[in-house]
């Protein structure tokens, strides 16, 4: 169990469509809830996704942990046209951030817009902190 979090895909759950798991089992311990992070500089969808993940990585480092402690992501994507791009970029980036081969659960929500019209993606996380 890495950082107190284990990812799991029950045999009766539907087939995965990308890099996420259906379940995260979290060993009892302190949790941190990371507010939605955005890319402050704007840019295209891929650049915003990577900048957002970098911000989350910086916060995790400040908390004394890494991406393998993430129990769950919630992702807000502006416009259905960006869903496939989200999956493609996540599939390219996650293997470098996580031990794999399993990844945290993620709830993906498609929204009309975020707090600033230039923002295309916002990601929040629940993290199990180290003992």
Image: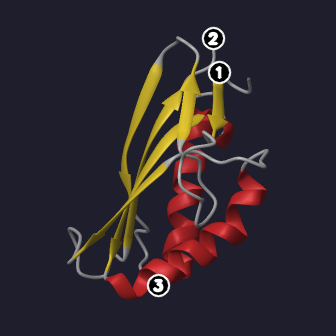
Element type at mark 3? loop
Which residue is the extreme one toward the front? 12
**Cα separation between marks 3 and 2:** 38 Å
| Disc with the residue nearer the chain's start (3 vs 1) | 1
Residue on which the image places disc 1: 4
Residue in the image at 48% along x and 87% along y: 44
Q: Quadrant of the C terminus?
A: top right
Residue on which the image places disc 3: 43
Element type at mark 1? loop
| Disc with the residue nearer the chain's start (3 vs 2) | 3
Residue in the image at 59% along x and 47% along y: 21
Instruction: Name the quadrant containing residue 91.
Output: bottom right
**Cα separation between marks 3 and 1:** 35 Å
Query: Taking 19 as reference, is 119 above or below it?
Result: below
| Disc with the residue nearer the chain's start (2 vs 1) | 1
Question: Residue 4 vs residue 77: left or right?
Answer: right
Element type at mark 2? loop
| Residue 119 position within the rendered picture, expressed as x and y whole percent measured from the top left | 33, 75
Residue on which the image places disc 2: 131
- At label 1, counting other C-alpha atoms closer than 10 Å, the crowd grade (few under 14, some 14-19, many 20 or more) is many
Question: Residue 84 vs residue 34: left or right?
Answer: right
Q: Which dot marks residue 71?
A: none
Circles 2 and 1, Cβ within 8 Å, touching? The answer is yes
Residue in the image at 57% along x and 34% along y: 62
Name the front one of labels 2 and 1.
1
């Amino acid at each position: 169990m890495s950082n107190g979090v284990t990812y799991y895909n029950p045999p009766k759950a539907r087939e995965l469509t990308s890099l996420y798991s259906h379940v995260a089992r979290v060993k009892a311990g302190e949790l941190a809830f990371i507010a939605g992070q955005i890319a402050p500089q704007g840019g295209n969808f891929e650049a915003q996704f990577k900048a957002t993940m970098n911000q989350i990585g910086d916060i995790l480092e400040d908390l004394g942990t890494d991406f393998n402690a993430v129990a769950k992501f919630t992702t807000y994507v502006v416009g259905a046209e960006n869903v496939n791009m989200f999956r493609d970029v996540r599939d390219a980036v996650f293997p470098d951030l996580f031990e794999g081969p399993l990844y945290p659960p993620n709830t993906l929500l498609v929204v009309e817009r975020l707090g600033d019209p230039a923002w295309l993606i916002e990601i929040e996380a629940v993290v199990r902190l180290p003992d």
